[in-house]
Image: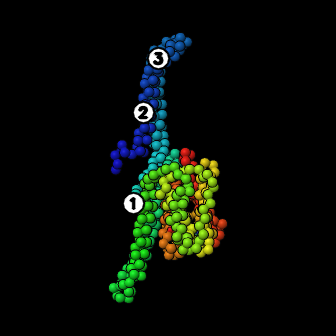
Amino acid sequence: MKRLRQRLGWKLFISYLIVILVGVVSLTVTAEIHTPTAIDRHTAQMVDMMGSNMGMMTDLSESFTRAVNEVLLVAASLAFVTAVLVSTFVTRRIVRPIQEMTVASRRIADGRYDERVRLIGEDELAELAQSFNQMAHTLAQTEERRRQLVGDVAHELRTPLSSIRSVMEGLQDNVLPADPTTFLDVQREVSRLQRIVHDLEELSRAEAGQITLQREVKRPAEFIQLAMDRLRPQYGDKEVALTLDLDRDLPLVLVDVARMTQVIINLLGNALQYTPTGGEVTINGWADAGKVMIAVRDTGIGLTAEHLAHIFERFYRVDKSRSRAGGGSGIGLTISKHLVEAHNGRITATSPGLNQGSTFTVTLPIAGKEF
Ligand code: ADP
């Protein structure tokens, strides 16, 4: 049994009792002080009218005092019963939901994130219950994402690891020749593992908001050119045309050049990966309403509305097998989004539909208008 001091129900009941007690005491004291004077005044008037009878007057005074005390006793008993009833009711209304929340929060602490409390009424307690349920919902989502992340990471690592393992077994059993092609296979898988680990590190830093930017005022053309130079050979190999079309006198932006180059490389890399030979990728740049827009348009496989809603989520790949074959892990766009947002910018994707190309647009504030 909990100590009384620790019980809200008892505290409420005792507070009612105190109010009643104070009421009764003050009424009694007032009655004690005022009753004799009042009776004396009235009896004096009666004596004036009816003549003196001292014995009757004393009797009258005593019975009046007794009557007042009786009335006070009855009233106090009634008030006591009312206090019991009201405190029981209020305890039910207030203490029960709080107890429910206590039990639910303990269950949540034990990892049962589906726990919810009932919403009764519309008062502050109902509001508290609603916030509680919302918190439980968010916790459940976070836990789900964490679980998914661990599963996805394990899955990502398994494929290159099992490739390496089978090559090693082939070498040991002399099924595979120990020649440069075999070693190149292993090296490719190792590079893929390194890329995944690197991306994961980047992702966790980005999600923790730990990316430090070394911002400088730059022309957008600068980092766009750097990214284009890096990918031009791959574009040449696949025979996809790469064109730059920036408005003249594009305003300056305050950016970390290395990070923005990384974003454009990611967009150009994706555009190349999802655009067949003979296709085109164009980078447009223009300014509007205090912002600079950089759009990477491709004539590739495009995206459906359903996929567009998810592509910035981590590990989301439209076609898992195809993207995996191309080395994609579904993290690139998530990192890009974090990087652009760290620059107070936005990144969006549009596509008219499958096989109709896609456009990824980065919006950055013009230097001096970041906030
Ligand atoms: P990945 O490393 O798998 O490319 P991203 O995060 O960069 O991961 O992209 C997520 C998914 O978005 C890709 O798997 C792909 O399905 C889709 N996607 C990205 N860019 C394009 C594009 N230009 N055209 C069509 N689909 C794209």
Alpha-carbon distance for marks 1 and 2?
Answer: 45 Å
Q: Is residue 264 above or below residue 318?
A: above
Count of marks, rendered view: 3
Alpha-carbon distance for marks 2 and 3?
Answer: 25 Å
Pair 2/3: label in front: 2
Q: Position of residue 210 (x, y in %)?
A: 43, 54
Callout 1: CB less than 8 Å from ligand 1: no
Q: Position of residue 312 (x, y in %)?
A: 54, 62
Please rate how many residues cluster around mark 2, counting C-alpha atoms within 10 Å: few if below 14, some from 14 to 19, many from 20. Answer: some
Secondary element at tag 3: helix
The amino acid marked with disc number 1 is Asp
Q: Earlier in the sequence, mark 2 or mark 3?
A: 2
Q: Which mark is residue 37?
A: 3
Callout 2: CB less than 8 Å from ligand 1: no
Q: Tell which quarter ligand 1 is in.
A: bottom right
The amino acid marked with disc number 3 is Thr
Q: Is residue 36 above or below residue 85?
A: above
The amino acid marked with disc number 2 is Leu
The one of 292 and 167 positioned closer to us in this rendering:
292
Q: Which residue is mark 2?
A: 21
Q: Position of residue 340 (x, y in %)?
A: 52, 56
Q: Which mark is residue 338?
A: none
Q: Earlier in the sequence, mark 3 or mark 1?
A: 3
**Would you say 24 lies left or right of 264 here?**
left
Please rate how many residues cluster around mark 3, counting C-alpha atoms within 10 Å: few if below 14, some from 14 to 19, many from 20. Answer: few
Residue 323 appears in the rendering: yes
Callout 3: CB less than 8 Å from ligand 1: no
Q: Which residue is mark 1?
A: 110
Q: Residue at x 60, y 69 (%)?
A: 241
Q: Earlier in the sequence, mark 1 or mark 2?
A: 2
